[in-house]
Image: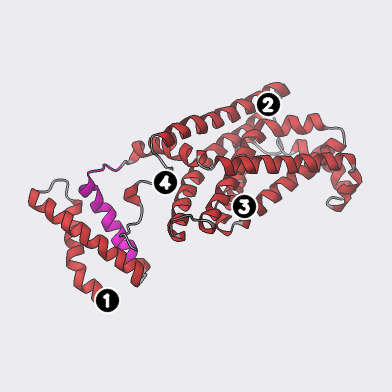
Amino acid sequence: MDVDAFVAEHAAEWARLDVLARRRRISPAEADELVHLYRRVTTHLALVQSRTPDPALTARLSRLVARARGHVTGTPRRSGWAALGHGLTVDFPVAVYRTWRWSLGMIVANLALAAAIMLWLRAHPERLNRVLSDDAVRQLVRRDFADYYSAHPAQSFAAHVWTNNALVTAFALFLGVTVVGPLYVMLQNTLNLGVVGGAMLGAGKADVFFGLILPHGMLELTIVFVAGGAGLRLGWSWVAPGPRPRSGALAEAGRSAGVIALGLAGALAVSGAIEAFVTPSGWPTWARIGIGAVAEIAFVTYVVVLGRRGLRAGATGDVDASERGDAVPVS
């Protein structure tokens, strides 16, 4: 297909559709014309995508078709606070809930591995020499682990923690397209947890370790494992797409992963605040762990209750249909 000739031949139709799609009110005759042009341009978009994939032209026609669809279908597009509210109460919890098998598998596998490493290192403390020197272990146990949470002002520490955890979560999510990416990120995170925990338990400081790690760690690790599970689901979507084309399955999983990433960023802000203000506080250990447990229960309840409700109502956790690409039936 000659792209320049194709554009020249249909540019007038596209321009007319753009004009009609931008009007708040149109006459009956213009409505008929809008529907006719919408069908035409949808076909043009499908032809461009299948015969001569031009990114710029595809994006242009996709935006045009999406804009016109609101008039054709009569479906109001959410914007502003309405879109934010729908995202928080429907899109995000549904997207996370749909990954529960993957996320639960991540939680069980990684916590089991971390616990096994801790118990093994507690029983064989000399094995720590393979990853840490004796001086490093003594410094970690005596000072570094506890001082880490109070060495910097709480506000700057919260920002640092949020940034670090957001990067880990983003890597776990979007490296999912490689399938092995989330497994590598999870393994690195779990090995670090297991080694530090093993060193603390071997030194007889289990109370210090769990007293400092649990307040924020319950929610933080849940978020990271959810990201890892969603990342694996993203990769598996093109490995085993089912009856759908691989590109369509990957696109749907990728859009859901984007929704999950935005929601988890907000949840990480909560865990970061707990780590910066609650974990190093002078409150009793039971109070600090209790706050972490409340945050964890609140997050899980929020996802399960709203996610299940939205799923039963037909929500998918994907973006609105008006924001997706268009396609024509093929055989």
Q: Position of residue 271 (x, y in %)?
A: 60, 35
* Numbered disc 3: secondary structure: helix
Task: Tell me whether circle 4 and circle 2 mark residues in contact (CB < 8 Å).
Answer: no
Q: Which residue is mark 3?
A: 182
Going by the numbered disc 1, the residue's amino acid type is Asp
Q: Which residue is mark 2?
A: 289
Alpha-carbon distance for marks 2 and 3? 28 Å
* Numbered disc 4: secondary structure: loop
Query: In what quadrant of the picture does the N terminus appear?
Result: bottom left
Query: In what quadrant of the picture does the C terminus appear?
Result: bottom left
Q: Which residue is mark 4?
A: 318
Q: Which residue is mark 1?
A: 4
User: Which is nearer the N-term, disc 4 or disc 3?
Assistant: 3
Alpha-carbon distance for marks 4 and 2? 35 Å
Q: Position of residue 285 (x, y in %)?
A: 73, 24
Alpha-carbon distance for marks 1 and 3? 43 Å
* Numbered disc 1: secondary structure: helix
Above or below: residue 268 compared with residue 61: above
Going by the numbered disc 2, the residue's amino acid type is Ile
Q: Which residues are magenta?
A: 58-77
